[in-house]
Amino acid sequence: MKRLFVFLFFFVLLLIVCFVYMEVGSSGISFFGYLLNGGDETSSRIIYIRLIQLFSVFISGASLALSGFVLQRILKNPLIDPGITGVLSGSALGYVVASYLLPSFSTLFLFWKGLISFLFGLIPGIILVLISLYSKDSIGVVILGVVLNVFISSLVVFVQSFFDPNTLSSVFTWMMGSVGINDFRVVLVYLGIEVFVLIFMIFLSRYIDVLSIGEVDAQVLGVDVRMWRSVFLVISVFLSSISVLLTGIVGFVGFIVPNTLTLLTYRCRILNTRDAVVLNFVLGGVFLVFSHMIAKVIVGGYELPLGVVTGIIGAPIFALFLTNLIFR
């Protein structure tokens, strides 16, 4: 009964946040009024754009939460996050390089940008997994991730220096976190991919459990640790790449959401890893949708970069977790 209540609570929270998001906007057009009375072509266009943004931001948040959850489990480190580890920066570097080589925004070029973004994101992910295999210091892995993140971010800025001023401005805005896709068909493709990955992770959740108990115990249970760790690493980087393509670099979502649900799991013993996968998907999307809503309304007439809002919320929370880990 408690398990059903938890899922019902998150479902209702999702509906409320999505409806409020569709209602809020600088144009003053009411989504509820539009549903009741309809509207002209301008109103329809604005509601359409809001809907695209809602799906884009939700998919991005869900991707980051799932990616962070997987990284924390396979690396056995609660401080790991796709942004902190450099996975997001690696994907962003691939996207920026692809944008320079493939300036077109057609569907075919979006595919190649996505592929290059994924391949570049694999590099820091593989480095971190290799280091985690030979290091028992969880703080050291985090510090290495921060160093990788800074180095790759510097490479991103270096590549951006080759852009013309107009392209550079749009790319810089996207890097800070913004919703750039305006084709609902593309967003639906990403949604379909996201749902497929979610189902895949639900069926493989028991392997996440086994990997989280340690390499020796996992091998005793007959699990090929390196193979499954590699599988989940690829999944994590793939999810991070989707987020980068949709909303640019948005930090701390993959840290806040999985750790919040971990605390909830400890309190509600009825929740298992399969439940945690689903709830990370939902809460990650809800958190980023809420953050984007704040970004649109907190400064009148101007939309803050999405990464700024998540950074303001996430940095103090990360500092609290880090302090607790160091001084416990």
Image (cartoon, rainbow, N blue to C red):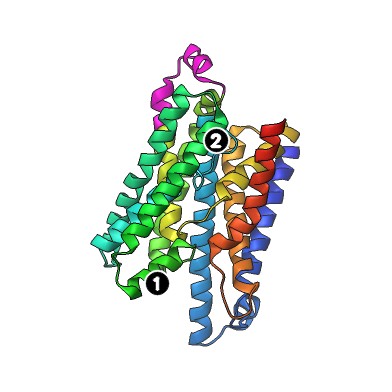
* Residue type at tag 1: Ser
Q: Residues within 10 Å of mark 2 (few under 14, many from 20)?
A: many
Q: Give the extent of the magenta segment.
A: 213-230
Q: Quadrant of the C terminus?
A: top right
Q: State the residue position of label 2.
A: 72
* Residue 296 coordinates in the image, percent (x, y): 59, 72
Task: Please name the residue shown 33% across and 74% down the image.
Answer: 165
Per the picture, the main secondary structure of the magenta-coloured stretch is helix
Residue 278 visible to the viewer:
yes
Left or right of 42 on screen, residue 3: right
Q: Is residue 287 above or below residue 170?
A: above
Left or right of 253 on screen, residue 13: right
Left or right of 23 on screen, residue 248: left
Task: Please name the residue shown 52% across and 60% down the image.
Answer: 57
* Residue 294 coordinates in the image, percent (x, y): 64, 67
Quadrant assignment, res 264: top right
Task: Please name the residue shown 39% across and 64% down the image.
Answer: 185
Task: Please name the residue shown 35% across and 40% down the image.
Answer: 123
* Residue 115 coordinates in the image, percent (x, y): 31, 50
In the current view of this chain or complex, which residue is farthest to the left?
101
Q: State the residue position of label 1.
A: 169
* Residue type at tag 2: Gln
In the image, residue 214 lies in the stretch drawn in magenta = yes
In the image, residue 242 lies in the stretch drawn in magenta = no
Quadrant assignment, res 37: bottom right
Q: Is residue 190 above or below residue 222?
A: below
